[in-house]
Image: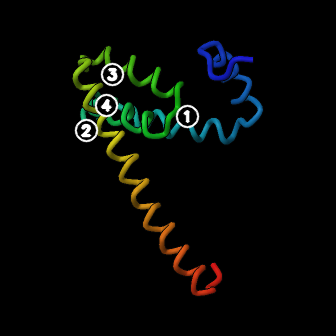
């Protein structure tokens, strides 16, 4: 079995049917975020979505938002910079969780329960 291949998207309708209320709520929210009339221009929204998709490591989201961004005129350089922003965010979050790990370690050393 291959994991996360483009053909898997054909199961979207099935998933939405099996969890209809949740799917409808998610779709409504997704459409609101992707609207054209927001204060943030659509191109920037897609660049933000690319960065978020990279940070979340969602192959389907990366595919969808990179293609949408490209259609809005985003360049390869902008995708590269968005990638580096995502990398910085991921490494910053790792550092933050490292601080938490030290705190937990110190608390455990002192015999303090979580």
Quick one: quadrant of the N terminus?
top right
- Report, in whole angstroms, how far the alpha carbon at label 3 lies from the one at label 4: 6 Å
> What kind of element bears circle 2?
loop
Q: Which residue does the numbered mark 3 point to in the structure image?
A: 69
The span from disc 2 to disc 1 (Cα, nearest Å) is: 20 Å
**In the image, residue 88 lies at what x, y percent?**
32, 44
Q: Residues within 10 Å of mark 4 (few under 14, many from 20)?
A: many
Q: Mark 1 — residue?
A: 27
Q: In the structure shown, which secondary structural element does the residue marked by tag 4 occupy?
A: helix
Q: Residue at x 46, y 33 (%)?
A: 31
Q: Residue furthest front?
A: 109
Residue at mark 4: 47
Q: Are marks 1 and 4 in contact (CB under 8 Å)?
A: no
Q: Which mark is residue 40?
A: 2
Q: Position of residue 50 (x, y in %)?
A: 38, 31
Q: Is residue 88 left or right of residue 77?
A: right
């Amino acid at each position: 079995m291959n994991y996360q291949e483009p053909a898997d998207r054909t199961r979207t309708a099935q998933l939405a049917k099996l969890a209809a209320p949740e799917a409808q709520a998610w779709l409504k929210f997704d459409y609101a975020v992707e609207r054209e009339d927001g204060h943030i221009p659509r191109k920037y929204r897609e660049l933000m979505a690319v960065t978020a998709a990279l940070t979340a490591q969602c192959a389907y989201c990366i595919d969808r938002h990179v293609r949408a961004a490209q259609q809005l005129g985003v360049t390869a350089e902008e995708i590269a910079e968005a990638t580096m922003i995502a990398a910085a965010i991921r490494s910053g979050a790792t550092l933050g969780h490292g601080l938490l790990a030290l705190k937990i370690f110190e608390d455990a050393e002192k015999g303090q329960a979580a």
